[in-house]
Amino acid sequence: QVQLVESGGGLVQAGGSLRLSCAASGSIFSINAMGWYRQAPGKQRESVARITSGGSTNYADSVKGRFTISRDNAKNTVYLQMNSLKPEDTAVYYCNALIRGSYYSIDDYWGQGTQVTVSS
């Protein structure tokens, strides 16, 4: 059984910063890519940022230059540093990870989501 537990969401004024964390626990053989998605009311879930096990990153155009994704492989944790936040960044943010539970099995896991609200 694998769990992803997120923390760090909240309410912030436009221009402010937040740091999200997501820790994976349970039966973990290895973790491949990890990432953050978000879903605003009435919109589809979209990818925000992803990072591979080797540290390669990619970002949605809307957050490039403002958000930074990183990971601590020793702690099975991924972070999202969000700076210069805008009201349009308001959404529920979800952690995602591709986790190998054993040599023979790999599955996609999601966190429960954390609310980020940016006031204007």
Image: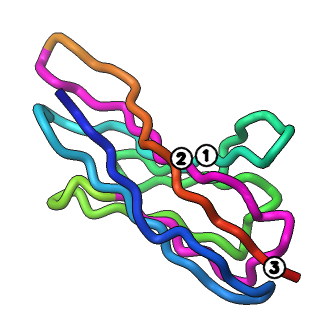
What residue span does the magenta drawing correspond to?
A: 78-103
Q: Marks 3 and 2: in contact by CB < 8 Å?
A: no
Between disc 2 and disc 3, whose residue precedes? 2
Query: What residue sits right under mark 3 in the picture?
Result: 119
Q: Secondary structure at mark 2?
A: strand
Q: Residues within 10 Å of mark 3 (few under 14, many from 20)?
A: some
51 over 118 or under it: above or below: above
117 displayed left or right of 82: right
Q: Amino acid at mark 3?
A: Ser
Between disc 2 and disc 1, whose residue precedes? 1
Q: Residues within 10 Å of mark 1 (few under 14, many from 20)?
A: some
Query: What residue sits right under mark 2 in the picture?
Result: 94
Which numbered disc, 3 or 1, marks the residue closer to the eye? 3
102 over 69 or under it: above or below: above
Residue at 22%, 56% (x, y): give it. 73
Q: Position of residue 70 (x, y in %)?
A: 42, 65
Q: Amino acid at mark 1?
A: Tyr
Q: Amino acid at mark 2?
A: Tyr
In the rendering, which numbered label is found on residue 37?
A: 1
Q: The N terminus appears in which quarter of the rendering? A: top left
Residue at 71%, 55% (x, y): give it. 91
Quadrant assignment, res 98: top left
Quadrant assignment, res 47: top right
Q: Secondary structure at mark 1?
A: strand
